[in-house]
Image (cartoon, rainbow, N blue to C red):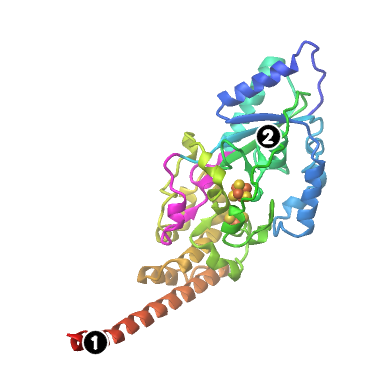
Amino acid sequence: MTTRQLSQDIDLQALADRIKAWGRELGFQQVGITDIDLESHERHLEHWLAAGHQGEMDFMAKHGTKRTRPDELVPGTVRVISVRMDYLPPEVETTRVLGEPRKAYVSRYALGRDYHKLMRKRLATLARTIEDEIGPHGYRAFVDSAPVMERALAQKAGLGWFGKNSMLLNPRAGSLFFLGELYTDLPLPVDAPFEEEHCGSCAQCRIACPTGAIVDDKVVDSRRCISYLTIELHGSIPEEYREAMGNRVYGCDDCQLVCPFTRFTRASHEEDFSPRHDLDRADLLRLFAWSEEEFLLKTEGSAIRRIGYERWLRNLAVGLGNAPWSLGVEAALRARLAFPSDLVREHVRWALRRQGEKRQTLIASSAQALSCEPEAIMRRNVSR
Ligand code: SF4
Ligand code: SF4
């Protein structure tokens, strides 16, 4: 991107206003503009990395200061246009599915088509619209795909504050939204950062986190976080977290669902975000029965595709281990004992052990109930 000589005639304030209006027409719920000074966020990132909270996500450290200095990533950048798009489809259940252990819980952002494509296309359209108005300008669009501090930039652009769960929170929209950025060489006027923090004494997210991953206010240790364990982690899921994962097989939303601001979430009517293949309420057993071909076919164009079939089965095996005991679950797990992957087999064996323990508990409680019955009948007869 090269810095361009701007025509003296351009009214930058008017242009910024029009960019926001165009952004809203393109389906973004909010658009803000910020400069590129991320110094305080750079320090926060350094501490987080020094503590090892990134786990296997080496890419978080790999790009050095390119992540926190936008002009190092895209030379010539002087402003970032930050956009927000809500994603929760209407009438999609959230907490009810978490309470149904035979069903699979898939993070609500991943139910439909991959959001990257849609968001990038819209950002590109926004950039072209600007071009139509003022002529060529330097820009690059990002959606969660490059070393970009998207939440920090959004906070600086006035879109929300960092909640204690480290998500960006908007007082009128909660946190169930995607963020995207347009790096630009246009010296647009910037918006006021979102300085107020509305969490107050609330700590619902920290209390609700199943694995205790929110180790401090605004600090998530990825190594404990179910989103990381089910999506980013390539190897074996540490046993200490498997039970707490429950039926969460792709991502986790708990720290957002309990947040009081989530009640302000507005439903998204983007067709792309609608659930596909009933992923919002599918049975664990049904998903576990998918062949690799089915997995590839049904996750085409979906964010889920990136974890691959092996990790998909790994996660589902954990979910089935946590499901109530049934002959069907045991049979489905046994059928995967020969699956050609050590990773899958190890998780299947763990799940079978868990199912076996539950079967034993059921047998023991039934036997106890049966042995109590004659005594109860006798007591009833004597008292007559
Ligand atoms: S996504 Fe889930 S596991 Fe991760 S911090 Fe939030 S509640 Fe905890
Ligand atoms: S649950 Fe409470 S503490 Fe956590 S992010 Fe929401 S408001 Fe903040």
Q: Where is residue 322 in the image (x, y as percent from the top left)?
A: 47, 67
Q: Give the class, few, some or many, for how many residues have Cα within 10 Å of label 2's Cα (few <14, many ≥20).
A: many
Residue 113 in magenta?
yes
Specify few, some or many for label 1: CA neighbours under 10 Å numbering under 14, 14-19, or 20 or more.
few
Of 118 and 369, nearer the camera is 369
Determine which residue is flagged by label 2: 181
Outermost residue toward the left in this view: 384
Asked whether 268 falls inside the magenta stretch, the response is no
- The label shown at residue 379 is 1
Q: What segment is highlighted magenta in the picture?
A: 90-116
Mark 1 vs mark 2: in front: 1
Q: Which amino acid does label 2 sit on?
A: Glu
Q: Is residue 231 left or right of residue 130?
A: left
Examine the rendered structure and indicate whether residue 97 appears above or below residue 91: below
Judged from this view, the residue extending furthest toward the top is 9
From the viewer's side, name the closer residue of 93 and 249: 93
In the figure, 101 relative to 85: above or below?
Answer: below
Image position of 75 with respect to 8: above or below: below
Q: At x 77% / y 55%, what residue is drawn? A: 49
Judge whether residue 188 can be spotted in this image: yes
Q: Which residue is drawn at 78% across and 42% down?
A: 68
Q: Check the picture and name the quadrant holding the C terminus.
A: bottom left
Give the quadrant of residue 310: bottom right
**Residue placed at 65% from the left, 19% from the top?**
18
Inter-mark Cα distance, 1 to 2: 75 Å
- Asked if residue 294 can be seen in this view, the reply is no
Which numbered disc flags the more N-terminal residue, 1 or 2?
A: 2
Q: Position of residue 72 (x, y in %)?
A: 82, 38
Q: Which of 360 and 315 is in front in this view?
A: 360
| Quadrant containing the N terminus in the rendered view | top right
User: Hey, what amino acid is under mark 1?
Assistant: Arg
Describe the element under mark 1 as helix, strand or loop. Answer: helix
